[in-house]
Each structure stands twice: as C-alpha cells, then as structure tokens.
Amino acid sequence: MTEFGKTLSRTETTIPGLIVFDLPVHGDSRGWFKENWQREKMTELGLPDFGPVQNNVSFNDAAGTTRGIHAEPWDKWVSVATGRIFGAWVDLREGPSFGTVFTTELDPSRAIFVPRGVGNSYQTLEADTAYTYLVNDHWSPEAAYSFLNLADETAAIDWPIPLADVEISAKDLAHPRLAEVTPIPPKKILVVGANGQLGQALRAEYEGVPGVEFATRDELDISSPSLTSARRWRDYGAIINAAAYTAVDLAETPDGRRDAWAGNVSGVAALARIAAEHGIALVHVSSDYVFDGEREGEWTEEDVVAPLGVYGQTKAASDALVSTVPRHYIVRTSWVIGEGKNFVRTMTSLAERGIDPKVVDDQIGRLTFTSDLARGIRHLLESDAPTGIYNLTGTGVPTSWADVARAVFALAGHDPARVTGVSTAEYFAGAAGPVAPRPRNSVLDLSRIEATGFVPESAEESLRRYVTGGGA
C-alpha cells in the first residue's frame, strides 16, 4: 500500500550513481497526487540535471511480469504510477563496480534514478501495475547496449516470484551471463583542434587513455552545417575546444576580422548548442585579452571584461556563449607556450644567431605552458569541479616579456644583457600593418583553480625545462 506524507529525500545505493528517492504522495478518499519529477526540488537534493527528452509508460496486466536486465546508454528516472514493482539493478559499466547488484521495491511513493550503463529489470508484484520512465536520449540502432540474463548465477537476484512461474519474453531469456556481458564504456572525450599547440599537449596528456578522440579541422570543421550529425553526440561526456583563431594583429584587418569572428564565435556557438542539447561538458580556452589591462593587481574570474581589440572581443563573445551551457569550463589563460613557433623559441634562435633583440617591457604577466594547461583541463573534468570560469597560468612572480627574453638568453648560455627593454609604443612604431592593442597587465589570479586541488607549475621552472630540455 502506498505510504502518504513522506518527505522528499534521497538514499544512495551500493551502485555508484543509482539513487532512490522517497516522494511525497498526497491522498484522500478521492485518490492521490504526487509530483513525479520536479526539476528544481530534485536537483537541489542531488538528482543529476539529466535533461529528459522522452517519457515512456510500461503497463503490465498480471503480477509477476518480469522484464530485463537491460543496460542502455542513457540515464533514466523510473517511477510507479499504480501498483508495485520489485526492481533489480546490476552495474554493467566498465570499472570496479561492474557486477554490483542492488534490489528494492518501488511503489508510487518511491522512485529511482538509473545512470547510463546500469542494467535495470522489473517484476510486477500486483496486477495492473504501470511504471513510467523519463530518458534523456532517443533509442538508436547505433547506440551501445548491454544485457544480462535474469537468472545469472553471479548476480544471484532473489526474485520474489520465481522466474519459472512468471511471464518473460523469449528475448530476455536469451540474454548472456555476466562473464559474457560486454560492459558499457564511459562516455568519450572529443578534442577539437587537435593539431594546434594545445591540441598536441592534450594528445600527450591523454596518451593511452581509452575513449579520448582527437579531431583536426580537416576531420571536424566546427563551422560546418553538418556538425550536428557529425557524431552520435550522446556518446560524449566532454568536448575540449582547443581550436581558436589567434592571429591578434591580423584580426584587425577586414579579412582577419571576419575569420576571427567565424573561428572564435560562430564555431563556438555551434559547439555550445550541441553541448547544451546533449548534456556534454564543454571546455573552452579563453584569454587575458578579454581584459583591458588598465589596472594593477591580479584579474579574477569575476572581473568585468573590456577587450581592447578584435581578437579580445571575439574571445569575450565566445566566453559568453559557452557560459550558457549547463556544464561548462572556461579556462582563461595568458602568454601560452607550446610546440611550434612561439616567443621562447624565437628568443632562443636570436640568441644563437648573435642577434640582440628589443623586447617589450611594459606588459606584465606569467607564461603558461601547454602541458600545464592540458593537465589543468584534465583535472577539472576528472575532479568534477564546479562549472564556470577558471584562470590558469604558470605560478610565480609576474614578469615582462623583456624579463622572459633575458631568462631565455641566460638559460641558453648567452648574456641576458643583450636584450634591450622598450615600451610597446616604441616596439610597434613604424609597423607595416595594423597592430592589435595589448593588455598592459595580464596577471591572472589563480586561487579558484588552486581551491579545486590543482596547483599550476612555476612559470620559471617550466621555462627552464622548456629551454634546456627542448619542449613543453
């Protein structure tokens, strides 16, 4: 009999992510009423905001009707409309909890959240039992499913009504035993822009990790109208956008302005739509150029953006787009150094060729090496850190570009006094083409990402290793 007057509450089970909820049911002589699914109240209690797209009803004429054990690649919210069911769940996901079993009874006052990859099965305990389930994806023949035999000896489910005495489909009777089950793999990670400086660092960071895919622009163009059908997006847990237009001076030209907005805004908008629609975490790399740099002190994640040039404007716009995705990480960085052409390699080359450079000394910041950036991105995803903006640069005392150049000369065995510091205005005087305005102060506060347990490496130590070891 349904229990009235319960308080909405949650109970963890032995299977990670499988959560039982007690629901308030209000009844009188006319019948009863309940809120079967109430997003605000239930997410506040810890129900994942799983974004259901379909509501199904299973009606069963007789007691003992048994269905399962099915593991689908989507999340499910199961609740009884009338009658009672005995439920059995078996974890069929890859990992240490594979094969774990949980059983309980459900009536209109109890519901359960079943995460992706957990096998579920139900046996009706009363005639005319109906249960409903909300799911956050549509059935597809391309999706990966797993099944387990209801009578599996390892799971050893204690069915209230013996399986020999109940109605079971021939298909369910033919499901494999646990030893032959194909586990449901974790959701995949897609790295977009995989051939750039950050993309190469992410390749190194995730080397050998299953389920991580890398796509170059030739393989996946985020500005293409076919992007929405380019993948079965529900199979992805995260997209890391390592693609960007970064030619800050060229962005000040008519053609460059169009290319910057297309690459940094239009393409990101398409990724944001896909991520929001399919419940994917979107990781996006932002820049110190969203700030005007016109004050002292470190910039925090809460500071209002005020970009000076086209590149900074496109990055600020893309940040705003990504912030609309329910699960997003905007990783704001500065002075990025990785594989390929960069400031440090240019200075090393000048030192070795006997050229004494003039380098800007009125822009202040910290270097960020792509290996550290990739490590921080992985940390945010794997630690399930709160969504939002995170500053990520190297640690240590802020320096000017001229200071960095002198350090490079010294590390390469040359006289750092060969580097002459000049103002930004002096450096760009007489430039042949447009020059983007640079923020004078690019120092970012790192306390928020450090509070998640991630401590970036010293910029000074990373530079030493990069120059003497030959890479990021």
Image: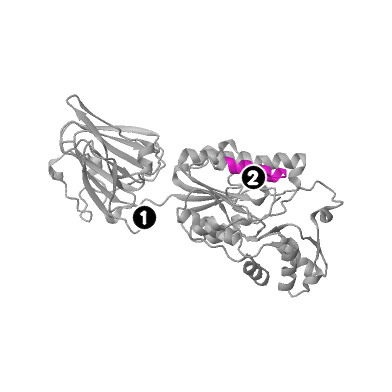
Is residue 371 highlighted in magenta? no
Dot 1 amino acid type: Glu
Residue in the foreground of this view, choosing between 306 and 431: 306
- For this orientation, the residue located farthest to the right is 430
Dot 2 amino acid type: Val
Q: Which mark is residue 94?
A: 1
Residue 177 appearing in the image: no
Q: CA distance from mark 1 to mark 2?
A: 43 Å
Mark 1 or mark 2, which is nearer to you?
Answer: 2
Q: According to the image, label 2 marks what residue? A: 305
Q: Residue at x 30, y 47 (%)?
A: 19
Q: Residue at x 69, y 54 (%)?
A: 441
Mark 1, other Cα within 10 Å: few <14 / some 14–19 / many ≥20: some
Residue 243 spot, x, y in % from top left: 62, 49
Residue 88 appearing in the image: yes
- Residue 314 is drawn in which quadrant? top right
- Choose the circle earlier in sequence order: 1 or 2: 1
The span picked out in magenta is: 304-320
Q: Residue at x 70, y 41 (%)?
A: 259
Residue 309 spot, x, y in % from top left: 72, 44
Mark 2, other Cα within 10 Å: few <14 / some 14–19 / many ≥20: some
Is residue 310 highlighted in magenta? yes
Report helix, strand or loop for mark 1.
Answer: loop
- For this orientation, the residue located farthest to the top is 30
Q: Taken as a whole, is the magenta stretch helix, strand or loop?
A: helix
